[in-house]
Amino acid sequence: MFRRLSYPLVFLAIIATGAFAQTTTPTTPAKTEPQSAKSGAVVDKAPPAELSKEAIPSGSKVYIAPLNGYESFLVAAIIKKETPIVVVNSPDKADYTITGVSESVQAGWAKMIFLGSQQSNEQASIVMTNVKTGVVVWGYNVNKSNSYKGKQSSSEACAKHLKARIEGRE
Amino acid sequence: MNRKSLSLLLMLMLAAVSGLAQDAAKPIPAGSKVFINPMNDEYEKFLASAFKAKKVPVEIVTEKDKADFEITGTTESKKAGAAKIIFRGSWRSSEQASITVTNLKSGEAVWAYSVNKSDSAHGKKSTAEACAKHLKEKIEKGK
């Protein structure tokens, strides 16, 4: 009799513990957040004004560092979007350099079945640095969960925003 | 030689000179010597074949020192998985490629193109031919 009752009791206790753990987990960082803010952490510091103010002149020479093939997509996007810069093949000839990283995840079977999408998940991040001063003048992150044209879409987003930055719209 | 024929000759000469000047001003003049850098999956061979198939007006050279322009790029292929074959009824591969044409004298990228085909009928051949077709357009029309 005792054994029969003990099994469901233990099972219920495990479920209750699991549920409790799930509900309590998110509260832990909430408690710590104000503490870090009070202790004067880096979080509240405003970015230096010079970084965002430095204008990128139209027609600047830009070198794009190797990014596992993504640099080629970036050049194509810069030309397609008519971004007013000149891409050069050597860092010695450049006023600015672009470095970054990109990542692609192909659609798996679950995405194809449940979402009916075979488009990849793309993310990229690029940073533009002034060669003379070494100051980062611009940076952009892009994440496309259903990228229509793979790397081409993410690189064109980067080129579009770089154009906006050069023309002073961003 | 009378005045009429002289002026006609002058006009023809001017037209020829302006035509030559326009050709030189084009970022990639027809007949340029192009070196295709080695790429992953030997894509440079697909590109060279596509240039021939699409009659791109450039001369492909095997040594970089002899070239006016160089082509660099990358390609990526993904064969159709089981899910794509069963649920979408397509066994064609997904292809993407990107190429850049750089002027070797100035070091400036003069043209670049990206292509993405989610159902490529002929795999890499299709993307290479798309690149070749657009390069031909660029050379001939300058657009």
Image: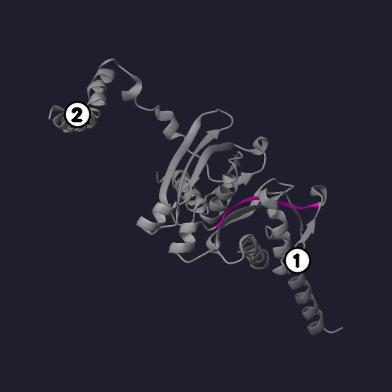
Residue most extreme to the top: A39
**Amino acid type of the residue that numbered disc 2 sits on in the rendered structure:** Val
Left or right, A9 with respect to B80, comes to left
Do discs 2 and 1 belong to a common subunit?
A: no
Q: Is residue A2 above or below residue A79?
A: above
Magenta span: chief secondary structure: strand
Query: Where is mark 1, residue-wise?
Result: B20
Q: From mark 2 to mark 1, how far is it between C-alphas? A: 90 Å
Q: Is residue A43 magenta?
A: no
Secondary structure at badge 2 equals helix
Left or right, A165 with respect to B105, comes to left
The magenta region covers: B67-79
Front in this rendered view, residue A110 or B108: A110
Locate residue B33: give its quadrant. bottom right
Q: Chain of mark 1?
A: B
**Amino acid type of the residue that numbered disc 1 sits on in the rendered structure:** Leu
- Image quadrant holding the C terminus of chain A, namely top left
Left or right, B103 with respect to A52, comes to right
Residue B131 spot, x, y in % from top left: 63, 61
Q: Is residue A122 above or below residue B139?
A: above
- Whether residue B55 appears in this view of the structure is no
Residue most extreme to the front: A1
Front in this rendered view, residue A69 or B24: A69
Q: Residue at x 63, y 53 (%)?
A: B99
Residue most extreme to the right: B1
Query: Where is mark 2, residue-wise?
Result: A10
Residue B64 spot, x, y in % from top left: 79, 48
